[in-house]
Image (cartoon, rainbow, N blue to C red):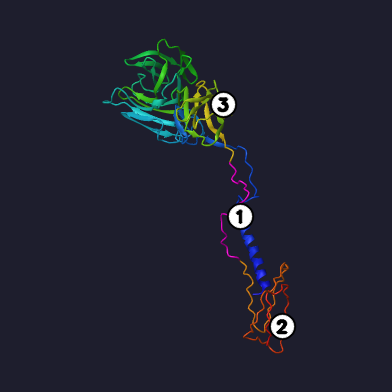
Amino acid sequence: MTHATRWLAGCLLLALSLTLAAAVATPGAAGSAVPAPQALGQVTLFHDDFNNRAQVQSYQRVAFTDDAYSSAYGTGTVRLLEIVDSLKADRPTGGNYNTPWTVTRQDTGWWQAQADGVQVYTQHDSGDGPQSGIVFGYTPPPTGRGTNGFIAGVSSKIEVCTGDESGTRRLALGLTYVTSNSDVLVFEILHRCGGGISWQLLDVDPLYGLKSGSLPGVPEGQWAQLSLEYLNTGLFRVCATGNCAVFVPTGNWAPVELLSGSFNAATWSQGQSLLGRFQNAYLKWTTTGSLVSAPIARGVNRYDTFYADVSAGSGGTAGIVTFDVLDGVTNTVLRANVYDGASLSDLTAPSIRLRASLMRGSYAATSPFVASWGVTAQEPTPTPTNTPTATSTPTRTPTATPTRTPTPTATRTPGVTYTPTATPTATPTNTPTPTRTPTATPTATPTATPGVTYTPTRTPTATPTRTPTATPG
């Protein structure tokens, strides 16, 4: 090829090489932009809105949103454990009363869900034991029985009574509990056939009465709202449709543990039967409850803030909710009585737990509750990923094949003149001087086609490095 052609091809290859090198240059190349370090950022390290119990490590005497017969049911909150059941046909489990109650039948009897409550029937026949009846009982969980007070209630209605009218046919509400000296007592209120209302406090071993009384009656066919209460101020109170009696214990009668609560229908003499209904049962006995979160690991982050959405309840005397931060491994209290928005930035434990303690202010008030809680953290300052250097060696070798094919080297055919398609703009800076003059005579003489003259459109500016001396033929 001619010198001009070789020079043009070299320029093209150099330009292509520079383009590819720029395309694959490493991020750390000298002169490249380096991202500035960013400030600490807040992240949510832990959050629980109690839609389930997945992030709860343990709990005592509290209920969750999936506890169908509690005041927490469907609220997305955690509340003190208590039973709330309309007993009506549209309740969460319909006619299946074995949630949350344990239903037992003695001798002849049945029960069924109705639109306004549960209807019960009991009959005492010859050959039956000393009592026939239907009992709906609730037993608190073993870790949830402790109490220093309670209130229980249900509405009852007597529909039909038959048989002996000795007053032993009745609907009733009762509580069984343990005192501080381990005595087992029963506190109950009775709605008898004929409408009479009476109450009694019994020692069950041996069975004898400690205290008793009566209240204004409620006619058959009408609802009577029955309730039993031990106030943590030291008073017993029993009520029927707004009429109440209060008495002070004269012995060691105060509760420390609730064994069970129940409502029932009973007959005692041969030939007796009773048809009645119950609705709107409830039982509150817990005065305190607690829950502890699963461990919260901070990783490389720094603890920032504790937050919580809580309520002390409403009506009566409001309750209290307090929070503590525990070590995630030892459960040692790291910070007591923290509040919503409190800073935890000074804590360095690898993991922590949260603990909530709920306390009831009064049984007339709704339970205090926790709707959500959590911990935020601060991320560490990230290490820059680009460090400028004086020089940089590409870590990638271009493998791409040039997409432009250099102009092929022309082979000159005698009698044909090729026209270049580009005119180089650079002028060689050095014109070599021929050091040798050839003396050989060409062995072939090109011949031009007669009558045809080819005129070049480009005249090379470079001086040939070799001057032939042979004379064309």
Q: Which is nearer the N-term, disc 1 or disc 3?
A: 1
Q: Which is nearer the N-term, disc 2 or disc 1?
A: 1
On whether residue 47 falls in the magenta region, the answer is: no
For residue 384, which numbered disc appears in the image?
none
Of 57 and 397, which appears nearest the observer? 397
Locate residue 277, reporting x and y percent. 42, 28
Quarter where residue 130 is shown: top left
Residue at 63 percent across and 49 percent down: it is 390
Assign a secondary structure to mark 2.
loop
For residue 339, which numbered disc appears in the image?
3
Locate residue 347, reporting x and y percent. 53, 29
Q: Is residue 191 visible?
A: no
Locate residue 319, reporting x and y percent. 53, 22
Quarter where residue 408 is shown: bottom right
**Which amino acid type is shown beneath numbered disc 2?**
Tyr
Residue at 60 percent across and 43 percent down: it is 384
- Range drawn in magenta: 383-402
Residue 114 shown left or right of residue 415 in the figure: left
Residue 449 shown left or right of residue 352 in the figure: right
Residue under label 1? 25
**Which amino acid type is shown beneath numbered disc 1?**
Ala
Locate residue 279, reporting x and y percent. 45, 28
